Amino acid sequence: MYSRFMYRLSARLFAGLALCLTALHALGQDDTYTPTLDTTGATYRYFELFRQQLFDSANDETLYRQLRKAESSFPQEGEYPRWLSGLYSDSGMLDSAVACMKRAVACDSTNLYYLKSLHDLYVEQRGDPKEMTSVAQRMVALAPNRPDLWYALVVDYMRANQTDSAIAICQRLRGLLASTYTVDLIISSAFHMKGQPDSTLAYAIRNANAHYQLAEANYYVTEVAANLRKDSLAQLYFAKGLQLDCPKAPFLLTHLRYLCEIGKPENALTTLRKVDSLCPLPDSVALRIIGLFMYSVPPSMLAQKENQELMEALFAKLPMSNDAIIAKFRFYELVKERGKSRQLIARLSDLYPNDYFLWAARMEIEQLEEHPLTLENWGEKTATLRYIMRQFPHDIAAPLNYLFAVQKLVGAADERLVDSTEAIIDAYAKDLKNSNKTDQYHYYSQDSVKISMPKRLKLRENLSILYSYLGDIEIGSKRYKNGWKAYEKALKYNDSNALACNNFAYYIALYRPKKLSKAKRLSEKSLALDPKNPSYLDTYGYILYLQGDLESAKAVFTELLTLQRNPGRTALLHYSEVLRALGNEQAAEVYRLKAQYAADHAE
């Protein structure tokens, strides 16, 4: 938290200082300077003609060559290096501009105009702070009564991390600088850079009290106080600032995040509501504020009427995009306004029939609904799933959810479930057969980035998943040959299908003990693809047990229990069998009892 505030304050500081520096020559100081070029000479007339032609016709590469040639054609002293420096600067060639300006300064080291031009180039170039400091020191020596030059020196000292020198100048020349600059803010920033937060806060408060009519001065105290976890002080100065002007959007977001981080989300909501009553809520950070509240504020608090209205006001500021739609959908789900979320997604998906993410969200919310499936309402309840299967065939969730619905309606052992699965497989296989190697699926991500994927590769992956599902159904219905054929086809279409490898290995271990070596190879492959998967570790450990490699089996189950304290009834029973085979009857009984009371799924 501290480092993030440090970075933000430093960024804020230097942004402000850089802005001030760019305006130095517009502060009313007399920087007029009369060139000493002989404007009647042929050299000057040639220079002017060259400059005009240069910017009328040259591209970047030609421009650079011509400038280099010009540099050797003109005198190397007096005004010519300064004029060449200006040409280089206008062309964006800052290194060359600095080099020419250095030559001009070398010719006349007491020329304040030359020194200031060189300093401005250093600032634009973001050059060496030590060199900038040296030039600024020479400037204040020539004009000690100019606050803009002293301010430039202060900034250079801070850039060079010579904060003590910067503070000393501000304190010694407070009267001179205060006519133009907020001295206490500069000192506060310098103490911040030194890592002295108490002094940073003291001068921030002093600055806010001196400039009490400036909202930014009060908001700065809010930031510094928040950094020190002085919560009441941060809130006090935020309220003072809000009475004067609206906070900038990034600062408002930072302050709301701070209130949530210190465990006061209710204050964050109250603060934003107060801001909303006085200022327009900021469009630029609306989505980020929504995300902050959704992840930091308890859902029960967000569900309160006034807070829902506040969130709705934020949502109203978002442009129509997948991000905004998904965020609003998630919010309605979070506060259990499922009717609103379904209406939102249904309306928008009907409006945008080709938007994959809208239809995926519609499928998701419909799957969460508790409704009895009957033959009479089958068409209505599965309409979204069937639409996605037709319109977005790359999506495997829709066909799987459709098959789960069939299974829910008719039961896992019913032949109609197999028929439905095979019908979907046939449709994918036909599409694969008719596709070309160069065919692509296209859709847009949630942040509106176009995503493309090879059609044949995706179809093969989907066929592998569907055949693996078919294998589970067939084995569960004791049609073992059909099940093994389905698994083999799953791996034919995608031999990196970890789930198919694992399930095939487990059923071989259960029903074909003579083929344990094949089961082991498949299990090892599934773990190579997903080494921390508890189910895959259970399968592998059980196969090792069946092969008689008890110590290795025990090691696998030890790793499994490290990853998941309650991996489920089946895994606990397997481990109990391993321990009993090792002669550890007492431990085996403990895990048998754990299995007896464990849920038949992982935590």
Image (cartoon, rainbow, N blue to C red):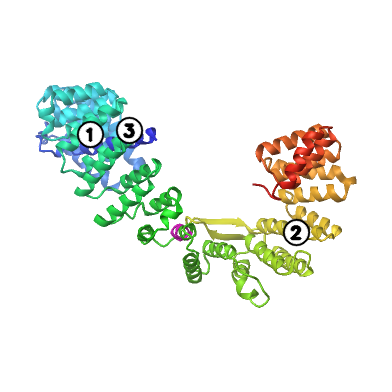
Q: Residue 467 carries which label?
A: 2
Left or right: residue 19 compared with residue 334: left
| Amino acid type at image mark 1 | Ala
Residue stretch rendered in magenta on the structure = 323-329
Q: Which residue lies furthest to the right in this view?
A: 514
Quarter of the image with the N terminus is: top left
Q: Principal SS element in the magenta part?
A: helix
Gap in Å between the C-alphas at discs 1 and 2? 68 Å
State the CA–CA distance, disc 3 to disc 1.
Answer: 13 Å
**Residue at (54% x, 60% y) in the render:** 443
Give 127 or 424, whichever is nearer the viewer.
Answer: 424
> Relative to 528, does residue 278 appear above or below in the rendering?
below
Label 3, secondary structure: give it. loop
> To which residue does mark 1 refer?
204
Q: Residue 228 carries which label?
A: 3
On screen, residue 244 versus residue 228, left or right, reads: left
For the residue pair 299 and 127, the one nearer the viewer reads as 299
Residue 223 is drawn in which quadrant?
Answer: top left
- Mark 1 crowdedness (10 Å alpha carbons): few <14, some 14-19, many ≥20: many
Q: Is residue 243 magenta?
A: no
Q: Where is residue 506 in the image (x, y as percent from the top left)?
A: 80, 48
